[in-house]
Image: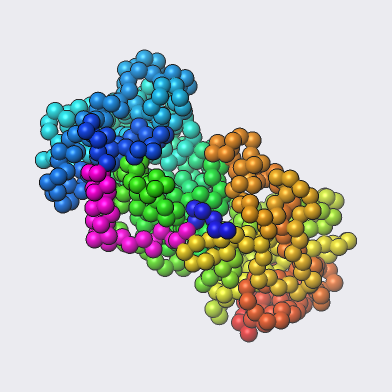
Amino acid sequence: MHLLHQRGPLHDLPDTQEAYDAVLADVVEQALRRITPEGNLEHPDCHDDIGDTSLGTTSLLAFAWQRGKDPRLPEAVRRSLAFHLRERVYTEDNPGYPNLRIRNSGLPYARYVLEAGAHPIGDWPSTVWALLQAVDILDAADGLVEDEQRTALVELAHGYWEWLTEATYFNPQEAGNQAIGCVVGGLMLARHLPSEEGESVRRRALAVYREEIRAHRVSDRGALLPPEHGGAYDNNYGPISLSFLAQAHRVSGEDVFAEDGEALARYIDARLTGGGFDNGGPRYSEQHSGFESVLGLRYFGARIGSDIGRYRGDSRWGRHAAKPDGGVDGHFAWMLIWQIQDRTPWHRTPSTKASRHQLRAGTVSVAFDSRMTPSVVEADGTYYLPAAVNRQHGFGPVLDGFLLCRPMGEVRVRDVQADGLTAKLVTKPVVGRDHVLRHVRSLYVTDGTRLWVTVAVERLDGAPYLLAGLPYAADDGDRVRRTAEGDVTSAGALRLTHPSGEGADHFDARSELTQEQAAFALAADPRGYGNPDEGWRHLVASTAYEAEPAPGAPEHLHVFAVRFGPGGDFTPSFEGDLTVHTEAFTAVIGPEDAHGDPELAITAC
């Protein structure tokens, strides 16, 4: 079974101007066939996310006319714009809308669902989207839109801005992408207003960004991020926020957008596997955005010098928003326009800088969470998630059902590259059920095709084992599919276990259930509104690789050694405190330096 939303890397989409012209030509033909006598360009199956969609398709027609001067387009643009101005502008409060600060303001807004009171919670982002569609039309209006319509559209866009920033609470869904999109709309609108009025809107947009977005960033993996639906990052919406930051920097030139975009881009780079797989987020666990992420990944990938375009997108939205039949939907139209306007080339090679939360070489990568526990391991085309035992999640030694991976103090990290090998040593102080402080040293070494993991801890009483990951997905090149096993070898006995209990809180990788489906089933709220990250934390047990201690370890240590990926016999040896010999390298974990950080030396065999 394939994961529906993680398909090919986004940088694989052709991005030449000729390719974009072909996309626009298809949009034009679809729109001209679809337009109704009244000027409506909405997809016939559109029900929600509807308030901006006809206007969005109008903006694509205006942009296509600006590029190619197709004589069929001016009349279609004027007729469809008139439809929006006449039929899709609402000034009476939507019954049941909970986020108004000023009632009966008379300011215009766009509805998420047209029926009054049917689903008003989405009106704020729909109005942001409508503002963005409007300013894109204004950018292409010269010689295309008559003065009377242009004046009405400027007034409407200004009204949208005032409704978003004055009549309602700002960013009521705590969605960073929506909030930054609103700021972009204000910055673009300012260019179409008289100078004094425009400067006022620009100042207000920058103040909103500083006070309502930047001041509320949250920390994850050492980065400050715009919160997304109440969490630090969502792998569907986070790259969309990156695109908004790119556009904000493009239209304003303000350094703050470049700084924050680069921080978010480096964070994405660290959490992505080399193959572009990622999971996790407070709104969706596995759903990935498509073309909406291209601008930000391309723009900031070039700025930070890394190939974040490897991010796997949803190819069903490879060029523009689309309905199940493939028909164009105007939702997100502005993002297609902006990525065509931006000529930044893709940066295709990985960053050479060591990253605290990432180990990556060749086809092997490990992304680490804030506690420096692997959040996903990639080796030999297989992706491993942290396993669960007794409601504890992670990667590390287990004794009497207790997982030793949560730090009780500073986590020290040392990165080394030598002889074609890339290595990371992670040292954690941890406390077990007995309240004894122990130091767990985890060494990760890769030659670009295999990953060796060695975990050492002071000798434990009983029968400890290493919880060594949940095999979850495999790479088919242009698709990601489910799997329940991987190529793992252990120096001690190795077993692949599956949970013996039943119910939603026991995840068996052999089932067809996806991680996202399981996470939503455990979340407190319905799918689409619950937090799957929070739900997944309720998991009691999962499929897991379990490795027993390696033979021949020094008397004072328990050492676990596993290898992910292809290879022959695996018989590592150990000496001292601690030298590790394998078929590919010798690693010496030396004494602590003057700062208390353990030394590490790697030599290839």
Q: Is residue 599 above or below residue 410?
A: below
Q: Residue at x 59, y 48 (%)?
A: 516
Q: Residue 47 vs residue 495: left or right?
A: left
Q: Residue at x 70, y 52 (%)?
A: 507
Q: Quick check: is 2 in the magenta stretch?
A: no
Between 522 and 596, which is closer to the camera in this rendering? 522
Q: Is residue 216 above or below residue 459?
A: above
How many marks do you count on the picture?
Answer: 0
Between 442 and 450, which is closer to the camera in this rendering? 450
Position of residue 76 measured from the top left corner of the image (x, y, whole percent): 18, 39
Residue lying farthest to the top in this orientation:
104
Q: Residue at x 25, y 57 (%)?
A: 22
Position of residue 5 measured from the top left corner of the image (x, y, whole percent): 49, 53
- Magenta segment boundaries in residue numbering: 7-33
Between 148 and 502, which is closer to the camera in this rendering? 502
Query: Does the rendering let one see residue 595?
Result: no
In the picture, the quarter occupied by the N terminus is bottom right
Q: Residue 538 vs residue 159: left or right?
A: right
Query: Does the rendering let one see residue 381?
Result: yes
In the picture, the quarter occupied by the C terminus is bottom right
Q: Main secondary structure of the magenta part?
A: helix
Q: Residue at x 74, y 45 (%)?
A: 503
Q: Is residue 553 above or below residue 460?
A: below
Kindly indicate the quadrant of the structure image that contains residue 244: top left
Q: Quick check: is 21 in the magenta stretch?
A: yes
Position of residue 380 measured from the top left corner of the image (x, y, whole percent): 58, 71
Residue lying farthest to the bottom in this orientation:
605
Position of residue 433 measured from the top left corner of the image (x, y, whole percent): 83, 50
Coloration of the structure image: rainbow
